[in-house]
Amino acid sequence: MITTSGLKKVVDIRDKGYNHAKRFGSVAPLTLPSKGLGRKPGKIYQQFNTFFCTAFATAAASSYQEKLTLSPEWQTAKTGQVDGAPIFTGTDLRSALKSAILFGSIPYEDSPFTLEKDGEDKVARWQNYPANLTSNALVHAKQDFYDVKNGKYDVFDNIRSALYLANEENGVAIVGTPWYQSFNDPGPKGLVFMPPVGEKTYLAHAWVIYDFDDDYLYAQLSSGESLGNKGTLKFDRKTINYIFRENWTCAFILRDRKSDPAWRDQAYRIILGMLWRISNQLKLIA
C-alpha cells in the first residue's frame, strides 16, 4: 500500500517544447505491437513509509537500462545532493533524474546501506557514502531525459509510442501522478480501476511504466510485492488519461549515456584508470 506522498507537484516551463514528438518522433498507435515489448518487471523495491519514491523510481528505470539491479538508497542520497538537502519530505521528479545524470548509480550490492537495515536518516545523507563509490557510479550515468507525456496522441498512446522507440536502449517511463486511495486495492492481476466519482487524490507519487499492449500500460512501484500483482499494476487508457489531466503531472524517459560513442570512450578510460591504480597498489603491497 502506498501511504506517503514523496513527489512534489512542480510545473516546469522548460518541459514545454522539449517533448518526445518533437525530438524523437512518434509511432502511429495502429502500428505498435499489439502485445507490447515482452518485458518483465525489474526488482520490486520497498521504500517503506518514506518519501523517497522519486529516487526509487529513477533507480528502477536505470536498472532496466543497465540490466542489473541498482541501489535506490544511493539514488536517494544523490537526489538530496542535487537538492542540497536530504529528501526526507520528497522532491521534484526532475531532481532524481538529474542525480542519475550527474552522479550515476551503483549496483545494489555495492551500497553500504539499505533502507531496511540502516533507516532513512542514514540512507538519505550523501555525506555517509564512501568517496570511492563515485567513479564506479559514473559508469552507470545517464545522458539526459525527455518528456513523453506530450505528443501527437493522448497520453496513453504517447507513452506507448515512446516506450517502443526507446526499446533499443531499454528505456522505460518514469512518471509523476496523483495517487488515489482506491489504487491501493486493485483488481485481478493488478488491474487498476478508475477512481470512484468524487474521490479526491490524497498523494502525489512517482512510479515506472515498463511495458504496454493494446489495452494497458504495465507499471511497477516501490511498495513491495504485496501491492497488486507482486508489486506491479496495469492501467487502461481511460484511467491513464484521467490521472494525467493535471498540468503538474509528468512522464520522462532517461537516455542512456552509453548509447553515445564519446561516452563509451570516456567510460573505458575511467575503467582503465581504475585498473591502473589497482595495479600500482598491488605492486606497492608486493
Image (spheres, rainbow, N blue to C red):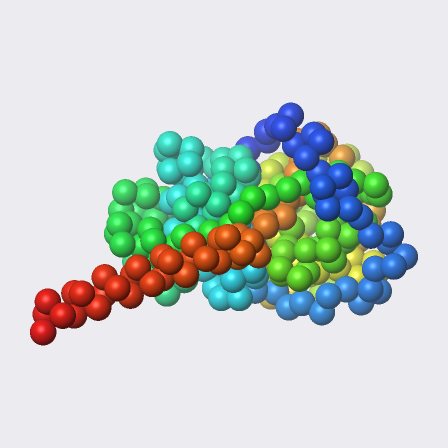
Identified at 80% across, 67% down, the residue is 35
Identified at 55% across, 39% down, the residue is 93
Which x, y percent locates residue 109? 37, 65
The answer to which of 272 and 85 lies nearer the viewer is: 272
Identified at 63% across, 56% down, the residue is 171
Residue found at the very far top of the displayed protein: 13
Q: Against 255, is 107 above or below? A: below
Horizontally, residue 34 falls left or right of residue 206, namely right
Which x, y percent locates residue 149? 72, 41
Is residue 129 shown to the viewer in this render? yes
Which x, y percent locates residue 6? 52, 40
Is residue 117 shown to the viewer in this render? no
The answer to which of 225 and 220 lies nearer the viewer is: 220
Horizontally, residue 190 falls left or right of residue 241, namely left
Give the quarter of the image for residue 179.
top right
Give the quarter of the image for residue 272.
bottom left
